[in-house]
Image: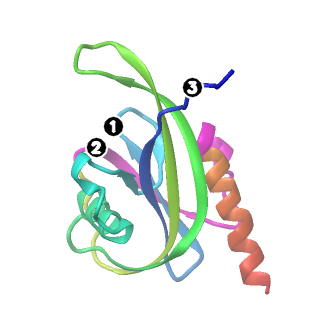
Amino acid sequence: MEQSKDLYFVAVKVFLEDGNGNLLITKDRFGDWDIPGGRLREGDFEVPLEQIAERKMKEELGESVQYRLEDPIVMMRHERDEILATGEREKRRIFAIGYRAQYLGGDIVLGTNHEKFEWVSVETFEPEKYFTGGWLNGVKEYQQKRISYDRI
């Protein structure tokens, strides 16, 4: 018997670090901690993922933020409840590709979907105090890989 296929939204996320080993995390208007980035739109099928990441960074962090996007480092699967236009809640599954990036400068001006940001130490911050689900797993994996790379 063949199992039915699952439906996922696709997202790009950016693990943005400053030059001091700090990672930027954001808090959305629903009270959840997040990593900058977001889902692909309907017309994004032919758009390179790096361009989608650039658009999302501008939407979420402002036009003046400068960074250097590096290679993908983490793949994540996250499930969350979302409120539909009808007011009903529905589960959404998201598959996200997490890129590493270096912050080069510019003022962070949060977009309408986020209310707060923090720079946290990649080595010492405890993601369990901020994140849940697949985002927590992804941030922990990023943290492990990032610390491992620095020791090489």
The amino acid beneath tag 2 is Asn
**Dot 1, crowdedness within 10 Å: few (<14), some or many (≥20)?**
few
Q: Which residues fall within the magenta stretch?
A: 112-135
The residue sitting at 67% across, 47% down in the picture is 137
Comparing marks 3 and 1, which lies closer to the viewer? 3
Report, in whole angstroms, how far the alpha carbon at label 2 lies from the one at label 3.
33 Å
Q: Under tag 1, what secondary structure?
A: loop
Please give left or right for residue 6 compared with residue 84 in the image: right
Please give left or right for residue 105 compared with residue 119 in the image: left
The earlier-in-sequence mark between 2 and 3 is 3
Residue located beneath label 2 in the image: 113
Residue located beneath label 3 in the image: 4
The residue sitting at 30% across, 69% down in the picture is 51
Report, in whole angstroms, how far the alpha carbon at label 1 lies from the one at label 2.
5 Å
The earlier-in-sequence mark between 1 and 2 is 1
The x, y position of residue 50, in whole percent, is: 37, 71
The earlier-in-sequence mark between 3 and 1 is 3
Please give left or right for residue 104 compared with residue 152 in the image: left
Residue located beneath label 1 in the image: 29
Quarter occupied by residue 66: bottom left
Q: Residue extending furthest bottom?
A: 152
Q: Tell me: residue 110, above or below residue 108.
A: above
Coloration of the structure image: rainbow
The residue sitting at 42% across, 51% down in the picture is 11
Mark 2 and mark 3 in contact? Answer it, CB < 8 Å: no
